[in-house]
Amino acid sequence: MGKAKIFVRERRKVEQGEKKSRFNVVGVAGTDLKIYSNHIRKIEVEQIAREIDGEVVYLQAGKDEELDDEED
């Protein structure tokens, strides 16, 4: 298999100046890596990717209306 990938997306309900992690890990491919945290900081996920010689894939989050239309 190719290079390991970590798929993340930005959390929707993050407010300016909030000190909570901004990203959710959606999935991991090409490695045995297990992530036990629901929320993760960008610098943390990038450091993990460097250590496993992988890459981070930032998923585009749609608006709520767009997601509702796709589910139908």
Image (cartoon, rainbow, N blue to C red):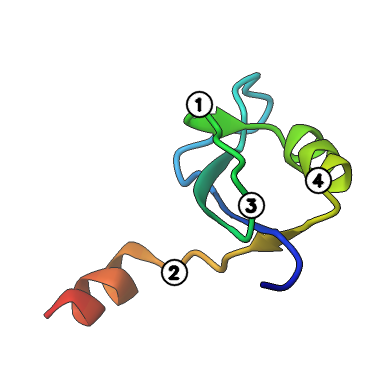
Sequence-wise, the earlier of marks 2 and 3 is 3
User: Marks 1/2: CA distance?
Assistant: 25 Å
Query: Which residue bears the numbered disc 3?
Result: 31
- Residue type (three-letter) at the residue carrying disc 2: Gly
**Residue tagged by mark 1?**
36
Crowdedness near tag 1: few (<14), some (14–19) or many (≥20) residues, C-alpha within 10 Å:
few
Q: Name the foreground residue: 49 vs 52.
A: 52
Q: Which residue is mark 2?
A: 62
Q: Are marks 2 and 4 in contact (CB under 8 Å)?
A: no
Residue neighbourhood size for the residue with mark 3, other residues' Cα within 10 Å, grouped as few (<14), some (14–19), many (≥20): some
Say what secondary structure mark 3 lies in.
loop
Residue 22, image x and y in percent? 61, 37
Q: Nearer the viewer, mark 4 or mark 1?
A: 4
Which residue is drawn at the image coordinates 55% and 33% (left, top)? 35
User: Which structural element holds mark 2?
Assistant: loop
Residue type pointed to by label 1: Tyr
Residue 45 placement: quadrant:
top right
| Label 4, residues with CA under 10 Å away: few <14, some 14-19, many ≥20 | some
Residue furthest to the left in view is 72
CB of mark 3 within 8 Å of CB of mark 4?
Answer: yes
User: Which residue: 60% across, 22% down?
Assistant: 20
Residue carrying label 4: 52
Q: Amino acid at mark 4?
A: Ile
Which of labels 2 and 4 is toward the front? 4
